[in-house]
Image (cartoon, grey):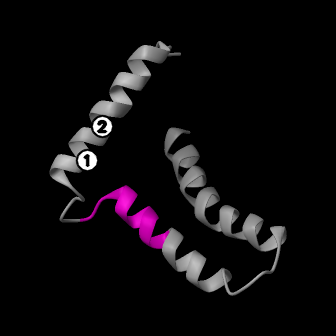
Amino acid sequence: MLMLSLPLVAMLAVAAAIVDRVLGEPAGWHPLVAFGRLAARIERALNTGRRGRAVGVAAWAAAVLPPVAVAAWLAA
């Protein structure tokens, strides 16, 4: 397992934020852009008022579990 020090992780996070600020969003298809669009659709569909924790859990599951399942399948 690769272990990175906290200062290195912090430096990489700052560098990534700078690169993102300079270059902006990818023009074409990108997995994170697709995930953002999926999350926005889920929020529009489920965030229709004060409906509680169960709807939040369902939104989280709908957004997070499919990519995790695909990653696990690809890693197997």
| Magenta part of the chain | 29-38
**Residue 36 against residue 13 in the figure, above or below:** below
Residue 34, picture quadrant: bottom left
Q: Tell whether label 2 touches label 1 (CB within 8 Å).
A: yes
* Residue marked by disc 2: 16
Look at 43% across and 23% down and name the residue there.
Answer: 9
* Residue marked by disc 1: 20
Toward the viewer: 73 or 31? 31
Which amino acid type corresponds to the residue marked 1 in the rendered image? Asp
Look at 33% across and 32% down and name the residue there.
Answer: 14
How many circles with numbers are drawn on the protein?
2
Residue 39 locus on image (x, y percent): 52, 69
Q: CA distance from mark 1 to mark 2?
A: 6 Å
Is residue 71 located in the magenta-colored stretch of the structure?
no
* Mark 1, secondary structure of its residue: helix
* Mark 2, secondary structure of its residue: helix
Toward the viewer: 18 or 63? 18
Residue 68 locus on image (x, y percent): 58, 50
